[in-house]
Image: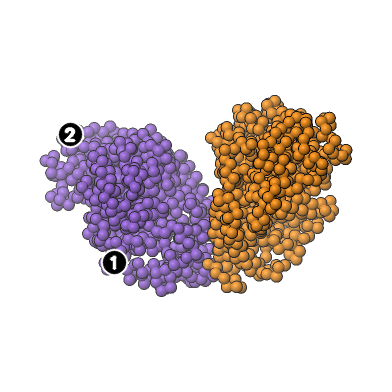
Chain colours: A purple, B orange
């Protein structure tokens, strides 16, 4: 049963775990009778979660009362269990199937005679994922008559990073306050955290760092004083097969340990970390490890002591290694005190320049976490050239589910298509087909660790994500981390159906909204890959020169003649040389550089003609007029759904879309006015620009 | 004696009340022997303050021990007393003199035989001011041999507005936290407030509103719950002849009184205010009255009820009238939710448009407080056309001593020259010579009330004003309010000498720094009267487009051809028509409009040639290069003073000047780069623009 008190179907709290009764056209419930669960073998916390979830799910979907039993088989039962335990699970599957199942994988089979559905796995986790899979099929109205499913996750690490601070705030959080902390304590609301764990596990997430990578003095003490509370969180998460990680403060030996140094080569410092790790593992034997932002944006790190990132990471890795823990070291390192007058320093180069030369120096339980692009989660930027460029180093890709630069969950922006594009990007690092997804799944370089990480987009808003439609990003992220081959469209349909039901018109409308949303958002914001143009600090809303004279290294250099950043090797910052030759040549040349990234790589006159046949300036005007109009269209389409959606859900989405419509016009007018004033070139269609 | 524990001579706490031993060239103290005070008549709190001050001053200046006696006259005594009391004071002055003394005035006379100095006045306040005058003469090394002084204040109301909030913050405060409040309570540090009162009284201030014009929920309760603490403040201030005013929340009848309305025509509301006023006067019989910011920047006001400002102000005036209290109603009213696309709305017009039509409607104990310019305390703007434009209405001019837009007490900017220029501006409203100072002193229209108000620049920084040199603005404001004919230079020399002593080189250097500072600040910031170009919200530092697309109504409309706001009547917003014909014609015409206000009144091409012979664009480049260079010069000049100044004072000023030097370069480069990029016109001298 739902553990939540907040479960009005339209408030969004249940998200995609609605488990609503499916009423297809025929008016016959195809899942009727699936009211028996057989636990063939096993009794641990994860199995118990799986059984709870299955019970809750089947009761919702069938409308019946579900019973759970031991070994007795019935018709239309759902049988779960692990292989090789003599429980009869093995018999439901071929040897081939069961031997193909990896630790987190599972198989699902329907016996055509009895209708019994068996979920077999090598581990409890596998069973949990199999149960969520079955419920997803039922929740989306799929057939369960002839299931023959074998699933293994493509990526090993499927992680969420909470940017939650212990004061209750969430850095770049757009959905209320933290569900983990308030008033510099871990919140006692374990129910909410359990419900979050259910959402994560159901989409395939298996790891979480529970505090912000910017670790302040109070969060440092999660390692020590607050550890007993962390243990409680770990227990809640463990039941959903999610490993807990902590973001750590590199200066902890000083701040917590009273040492005079945090030098990674100092024996005392190493001992301090070794002891700290031991204490954590004594309390949480399956603790995941440390997530570290060091020497970045004013955070402390090994640079202070003349050491490098490898020294810094390896010291922590050594402390964790005996316990099987890992260090995840973020590569978001750049000069954040840049002089805007200095055009030779290029923030885009920074991650590669800092880390690539260190390849081979990191211990095997260190993973570098690399942001998807070289700048910072912009609506459009090229793929980070660091991804795959360190064959002897573990890497995970970092996405940001929170829409910091893509509408902050006030605008709808379904990010899965963007992520797909990034994952399908061919780096050419090991010849054609060296796609990012193959680098990230570890297969290109044979990494010991690899996978996905992403910044969470949830908070204590009832609907988790502020914008109800932003739930699709959390769901889609997990699904994509499990299997990057899934299409953005399929994941969208899954999420829509699970959340809103199967009304075809509604599904199609929401699908259109989601699938167009990224393009629409891009069209009325920063053009042609140039990035930023947002208000400083909070990053919401248009401000073309917002970062133009700042120290953050994010410039567009617009003058009365043209715009863009020359990052070529021939005449610019040389950033293009960080790519494999094929991509380097593509970006280097004005002829081959894709339109959407033109201003990221080149400074061109406003009269430069794009592949589309338009000039840059006309492209800016056209996309901004169209984008604002299309935002209008989203709101109009949603209005037609009023009678097909729960009223509260309708209102939530309608309100956000109304804000987007207004704000898109503001974007349109500010950007167009800025460029008309600067270029003096009129819109060829004579539309109103102020 | 000094009551303060913070009295290291270089920490700035004593400000211009150093009372240091004067050691002129001759090495003979010209004030030696002035060690006797005779209180001829009177014993009230103000007299006691005067005696205390005189004692402290003479002891400091003479180095001797000062005695106070009753009626016995001695040689080299300082005798104080009020006229017409048979105390012998009258005898020291001619009938002509004593009859010319107004309530706050005083006369000072030295008897050439005895060297006795008599300070006579009609009131205790007059004596206090006379004492400060005498100490100022001695503090600046002036002769006291043949004093024959008769002084009356030119302006009746000489007021300070504290923008202090009860949480301890100070709106637009740049010198620490509030000295009046902390943690939503009135602070217990009455000593600090007394020392502030001494500073104010010594420069001639006679009124203070002790809380921010933006009155939040907690400050509303100063009228009620916190009144007993307000009484204590009033007592401290009363001893220095300073009347206490409260800024009130127009919604108080609702928030405090539980009424459902704050409609000024509602009988219940009127009763509420009448009762509130009575309670305040019962506690503070000499309470000054209310300062009100209503219907401005989201503050509540009579507009809510379809009433106008006259209705709103008169209701309060009626409540205060029986007690002799006044209402000071601010005219800073404009649409702060303007659409930047709308060029017909002109914030500069707002105060005049709102208030001028109401002339004659206000009760005689209402004063309108009019900001000096039509926008908001910019480094350069024209004089507000509302000043003097309401012959039947009391007005005071409002300055801002706090340098919100003029360097925030991080840059040196001596504002007295700016204020002088404003006060000397000829409005031509009653023919030639209708200067602002004559409007403000009440003589043009024969107002019952008139004078000066200004936003304070002090906080709990030890030196009161953050930048030690910013003390000159507080001192100068008070002196100017007393007598607008004083020259900026004279006031600067007074302040310098009182604060730093009489070293000629030092005085001349500081005088140069102060007297050039406004021009320097103007030269590297927003050019030619266009205003703003600052970062939003905090208003510090350059941001050319910072307000260009905002709702605050402060735009420059720069495009690739030109810049400026067309406020002419012929083709623009018609703002010029708010002036008397002479000024209107001057501003309306490109030929006669003064260069320094050109972009305030006109939109011109960058190639427009100024009266100076330079183009607008070259003027921008030249002034910005020169300004930054001259800022460098200020720091260099101060460096040479190292050996002539107390080390701590030297360091305080040197640090601020160093920041100014850096920040002036940032201004220079951002402004120049912005306009080079926008105009495409190169600097004719080929200097580096980025």
Which element type, helix, strand or loop, lies under badge 2? loop
Q: How dense is the environment of label 1, judged by Cα within 10 Å: few (below 14), some, or many (20 and up)? A: many
What residue is shown at x 33% (from left), y 34% (from top)?
A3
| Residues at discs 1 and 2 both on one chain | yes
State left or right for residue B462 relative to residue B529. Answer: left
What residue is shown at x 74% (from left), y 53% (from top)?
B487
Q: How dense is the environment of label 2, judged by Cα within 10 Å: few (below 14), some, or many (20 and up)? A: few
Viewer can see residue A609? yes
Of mark 1 and mark 2, the one earlier in the sequence is 2
Q: Where residue A355 appears, x then y in whole percent? A: 32, 60
Q: Nearer the viewer, residue B131 or B296?
A: B131
Question: Label for residue B243?
Answer: none
Q: Where residue A424 appears, x then y in whole percent? A: 32, 61
Q: Nearer the viewer, residue A265 or A617?
A: A265
Of the residues tagged 1 and 2, which is closer to the observer?
Answer: 1
What residue is shown at x 69% (from left), y 40% (from top)?
B58
Viewer can see residue B347? no
Residue at mark 2: chain: A
Residue at mark 1: chain: A
Which element type, helix, strand or loop, lies under badge 1? loop
Q: Nearer the viewer, residue B634 or B425?
A: B634
Q: Nearer the viewer, residue B101 or B225?
A: B101
Q: Where residue A206 appears, x then y in whole percent? A: 28, 46
Q: Where residue B277 appears, x then y in whole percent? A: 70, 29
Residue A466 lies in quadrant: top left
Question: Label for residue A70?
Answer: 2
Question: How far apart are the alpha carbons under marks 1 and 2?
Answer: 53 Å
Q: Which residue is mark 1?
A: A429
């Amino acid at each position: 049963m739902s553990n939540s008190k907040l479960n009005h179907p339209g408030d969004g709290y249940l998200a995609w775990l609605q488990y609503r009764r499916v009423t297809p056209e025929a008016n016959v419930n195809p899942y009727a009778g699936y009211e028996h669960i057989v636990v063939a073998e096993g009794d641990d916390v994860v199995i118990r979660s799986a059984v709870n979830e299955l019970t809750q799910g089947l009761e919702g979907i069938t409308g019946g009362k579900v019973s759970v039993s031991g070994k007795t088989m019935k018709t239309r039962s759902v049988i779960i269990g692990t292989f090789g335990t003599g429980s009869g699970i093995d018999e439901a599957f071929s040897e081939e199937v069961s031997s193909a199942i990896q630790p987190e994988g599972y198989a699902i089979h329907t016996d055509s005679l009895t209708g019994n559905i068996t979920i077999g796995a090598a581990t409890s986790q596998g069973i949990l994922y199999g149960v969520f899979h079955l419920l997803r099929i039922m929740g989306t109205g799929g057939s369960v008559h002839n299931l023959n499913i074998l699933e293994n996750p493509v990526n090993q690490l499927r992680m969420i990073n909470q940017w939650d601070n212990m004061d209750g705030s969430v850095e770049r959080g757009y959905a209320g306050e933290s569900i983990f902390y308030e008033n510099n304590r871990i919140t006692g609301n374990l129910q909410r955290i359990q419900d979050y764990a259910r959402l994560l596990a159901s989409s395939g997430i298996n790891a979480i760092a529970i505090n912000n990578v910017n670790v302040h003095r109070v969060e440092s003490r999660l390692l020590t004083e607050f550890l007993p509370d962390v243990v409680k969180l770990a227990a809640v998460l463990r039941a959903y097969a999610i490993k807990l990680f902590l973001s750590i403060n590199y200066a902890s030996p000083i701040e917590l340990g009273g040492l005079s140094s945090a030098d990674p080569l100092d024996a005392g410092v190493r001992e301090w970390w070794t002891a700290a790790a031991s204490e954590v593992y004594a309390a949480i034997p399956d603790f995941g490890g440390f997530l570290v932002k060091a020497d970045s944006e004013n955070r402390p790190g090994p640079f202070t002591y003349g050491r490098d990132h490898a020294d810094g990471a390896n010291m922590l890795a050594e402390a964790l290694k005996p316990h099987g823990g890992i260090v995840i070291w973020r590569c978001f390192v750049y000069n954040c005190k840049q002089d805007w007058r200095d055009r030779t320093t290029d923030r885009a180069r920074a991650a590669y320049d800092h880390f690539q030369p260190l390849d081979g120096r990191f211990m095997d339980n260190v993973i570098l976490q690399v942001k998807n692009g070289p700048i910072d989660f912009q609506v459009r930027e090229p793929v980070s050239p660091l991804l795959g460029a360190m064959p002897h180093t573990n890497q995970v890709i970092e996405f940001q589910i929170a829409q910091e630069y893509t509408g902050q969950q006030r605008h709808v922006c379904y990010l899965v298509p963007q992520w797909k594009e990034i994952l399908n990007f061919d780096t050419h690092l090991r010849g054609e087909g060296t796609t990012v997804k193959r680098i990230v799944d570890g297969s290109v370089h044979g990494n010991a660790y690899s996978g996905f990480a992403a910044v969470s987009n949830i908070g204590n808003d009832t609907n988790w994500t502020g914008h109800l439609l932003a739930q699709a990003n959390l769901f889609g992220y997990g699904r994509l981390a499990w299997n990057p081959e899934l299409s953005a469209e399929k994941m969208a349909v899954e999420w829509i159906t699970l959340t809103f039901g199967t009304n075809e018109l509604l599904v199609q409308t929401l699908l259109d909204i989601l699938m167009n949303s990224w393009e629409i958002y891009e069209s009325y914001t920063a053009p042609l890959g140039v990035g930023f143009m947002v208000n400083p600090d909070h990053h919401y809303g248009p401000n073309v020169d917002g970062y133009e004279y700042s120290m953050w290294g994010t410039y567009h250099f617009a003058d009365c003649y043209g715009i863009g950043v020359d990052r070529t090797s021939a005449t610019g910052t040389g950033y293009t040389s960080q790519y494999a030759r094929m991509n380097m040549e593509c970006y280097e040349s004005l002829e081959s550089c894709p339109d959407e990234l033109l201003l990221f790589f080149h400074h061109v006159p406003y009269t430069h003609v794009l592949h589309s046949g338009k000039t840059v300036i006309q492209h800016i005007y056209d996309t901004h007029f169209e984008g604002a109009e299309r935002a209008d269209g989203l709101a109009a389409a949603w209005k037609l759904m009023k009678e097909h959606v729960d009223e509260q859900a309708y209102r939530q989405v309608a309100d956000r879309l109304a804000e987007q419509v207004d704000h898109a016009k503001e974007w349109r007018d500010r950007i167009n006015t800025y460029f008309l004033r600067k270029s003096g070139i009129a819109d060829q269609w004579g539309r109103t620009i102020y």
